Image (cartoon, coloured by chain):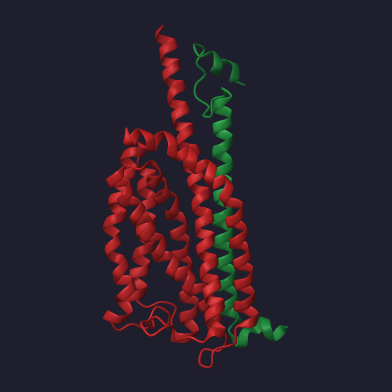
Amino acid sequence: MSEFFAMGGYAGYIWPAYGISALVLIGLTLESIAAYRRASRDVASLEAGVPVYSKKADPADPAEANAAP
Amino acid sequence: MFKLNFELANPKRFMDLSAKLLPWIWVIAVGLLGTGLYMALFVAPPDYQQGETVRMMFIHVPAASMATMVYMFMAASSAVALIMKHPLADMAAKAAAPIGAGYTLLALITGSLWGKPMWGTWWVWDARLTSVLVLFFLYIGYMALWEAMEEPVKAAKAAAVLCLVGVVNIPVIKFSVEWWNTLHQPTSLAKMDGPAIHSSMLWPLAIMALAYGALFVALLLLRMRTEILKRRVRSLQLSRARAAVQAGAA
């Protein structure tokens, strides 16, 4: 087992390469999922009439006046 | 009429189809990755010259070949976007860029970690390594251009032109190992007389390459779905702003 992790003396090169590959690909996947969730939430709240960006509250717009905290 | 049909029907059809396909593509990608990693680390024998460092090949070669293939996909999508004005083509190119940049970064890093024990250096400014670094900067420049421009239609056009200009780099990468003297070895796979690599190493490599390809497809579809939702957000905001202005004027 320790022989496996030693990688014939090249552990210091091989394991970082595998680790960084995993990190980049998992990171890319998580970022893509997060961006998708964010966008679906934005669509849902816009379709429900809630403004996505906090703009200056405009009393002329009833939807915005209601949504203001 | 033709154009109108595209714009109305296609993103909707894409959303339906990709929602059905995506779970399966994820299963395939994760399955291939698991199998490929197991074979790369436990089944494949050490190389008679390189010893255990040959295990670097199973993550370096797939990343490097995806780096150029994703760019060619982006270039093809950009060409379709410019010529046919297909709305999904812009989104496909834009969605592919961060994935291609990630694979290119991994090709550079794993190559560097492989180069140190085998060549005695982390980096050389030779044709292959430099042209791949240029590819990485092309991806970054492409993404920055999208971010820099507010209007999606203009950004798409500028980014597509940049992407197509950058295509000249692809044959330079491909043939750099034959045109110039370089530390990087020529390909052992895409040769006229068949791959010069034993099946005990070819199989793990092929499965890892397929896994990286499947992961690209999964991430591409997911990111394209996000792009479609973002454009929907944009158009909803525009129509709400317009309604607010009209209400104010009345």
Identity of the residue furthest to the bottom in this view: B48
As displayed, is residue A22 above or below residue B181? above
Q: Quadrant of residue B137?
A: bottom left
Which residue occupies 52% across, 41% down? Answer: B15
The answer to whether residue B53 is seen in the rendering is no
Is B181 left or right of B218, judged from the image as shown? Answer: left
- Image colour assigned to chain B: red
Q: Quadrant of residue B168?
A: bottom left
Q: Position of residue B163 (x, y in %)?
A: 32, 55
Is B220 left or right of A16, judged from the image as shown? Answer: left
Which residue occupies 33% across, 38% down? Answer: B153
Q: How many marks?
A: 0
Front in this rendered view, residue B63 or B28 = B28
Which residue occupies 51% across, 89% down? Answer: B50
Q: Position of residue B83 (x, y in %)?
A: 27, 46
Identity of the residue furthest to the top in this view: B250
Q: Position of residue B141 (x, y in %)?
A: 35, 54
As displayed, is residue A57 above or below residue B197? above
Front in this rendered view, residue B213 or B7 = B7
Front in this rendered view, residue B202 or B147 = B202
Quadrant where the C terminus of chain B sits is: top left
Q: Quadrant of residue B243?
A: top left
The chain letter of the green chain reads: A
As displayed, is residue A60 above or below residue B83? above
Quadrant where the N terminus of chain B sits is: top left
Q: Position of residue A2 (x, y in %)?
A: 71, 84
The answer to whether residue A9 is seen in the rendering is yes
Which residue occupies 41% across, 44% down? Answer: B88
